[in-house]
Amino acid sequence: MIEIVTPGEEHREQVFDVLRTALNLGNAHREERIAWLPISRMRCAVENGRVVATAGARDFRQRFGGTDIGMSGIWGVGTLPEHRGSGLATKAVTALLIDALGTGQPISALFPATIRPYRRLGYELAGTYTKHEIALADLPSVESSLEVVELERERDLEGVRACYRASIREQTGPIDSDEEDWWPDRILGPGWSDDVHRAIVARGTSGTIEAYASFTQSDAPELEFGYDIECKQLVASSREGLESLVAYFRGFRGIGASLRSPGPQTHPLEYLVDDQLVRHVWTFRWMLRLLDVPAAFEQRGYPPVSGETLIAVEDDLFPDNRGPWRIVADEGTVKVEPAEGATVRPTSIGALSSMFSGFLSPFDAVRLGVLEPDAASLLATLFAGPAPWMHDWF
């Protein structure tokens, strides 16, 4: 008999052991990780008192069209090898999605280890997580007009968060969280790494933080005693802030080999370098699922567009999403109304989620046969904007 349950304190070590095996976590910081596990936000498959599969959720806000939307971030999905293919992790994720919908979160996102089971749950590819790299010796020689100092967490935390919000104001896909460990530990702290860690801020004349970076120094394979700088975040809300970080990191050249940072597909560093020296070294695509179609549409931001169209949705998990719906846009304010009696060929919830993020063009969706042509023009205009991406892996 296998049950899907919220794990208790007695399950903490078992939950970690499933994750350690399924996700190859290793045993570093084992006790700290076990104590950290947010088990009240996890669901597990339990067989005869033993945890055999896990999934967890974190609360985020995700940026779409200049507006934040409550998002359930799914993480820690793992199954012991002898139970793989049984659908237990899918059941655990489904339980989390039902909970998220019940608490008013209209969307969910995740980084998939494998795509097929999440597509069956209604997720679809929706954006990128991209790491960029430049050799420290290739950083341009620029003047630092701002003071760069080591972060003082109590004094600087709110300023860092304000800088981050300013930097993503017009972006699509970046996330934020108010969970108590997210900024102090996950972003600005070393996390579970034993590498040398530092966090710095660039402060303007008024005292406002205009840039910051949180980074570790990891071994560089090409130098026995060298290191690469691995940024968790490298963020600037102004050109002066970015140039100040560049000047700071340029000082590491010699023993330091390279600077790596996540960012949008076109990293702002590329505009400070004359040649094509900033390389994409790793890209991974995340997935999105709309849990509540009307709420997600109405909470998203849009350009000042007016018009209306009809859609219907194919959603086996949440039948209330099916519609058909009339999408009415009035100068960028969108309302979703039931369209009783309308006959529209349904669009899958996954395809709609991918279009919603701006990842899948509605015109491409028409060519793929997953969207009615009449809806493409308005949806393409509504979902226009920067390519969707995330700073952060969760």
Image: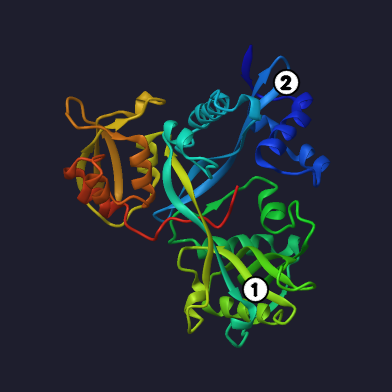
- Please state if 30 lies on the left or on the right of 352 as rendered: right
- Please state if 280 lies on the left or on the right of 233 as rendered: left
Name the spot of residue 133 as percent of width and height, x first. 58, 70
Inspect this view and state whether residue 176 appears: yes
Name the spot of residue 14 as percent of width and height, x first. 75, 29
Rendered view: 43 above or below 381: above
Q: Which residue is farthest right?
A: 31
Residue at the image position 57 percent from the left and 85 percent from the top = 140
Q: Residues within 10 Å of mark 2 (few under 14, many from 20)?
A: few
- Amino acid identity at mark 2: Arg
Q: Report which residue position mark 1 lands on.
A: 258
Q: Residues within 10 Å of mark 1 (few under 14, many from 20)?
A: many
Q: Nearer the viewer, residue 356 or 17?
A: 17
Q: Give the CA separation, mark 1 to mark 2.
A: 45 Å
Q: Report how many numbered discs are placed on residues in the image.
A: 2
The local secondary structure at tag 2 comes to strand
Inspect this view and state whether residue 204 appears: no
The local secondary structure at tag 1 comes to strand
Rendered view: 342 above or below 215: above
Q: Which numbered marker is on residue 50?
A: 2
Q: Which residue is farthest top?
A: 1
Q: Earlier in the sequence, mark 1 or mark 2?
A: 2
- Amino acid identity at mark 1: Ser
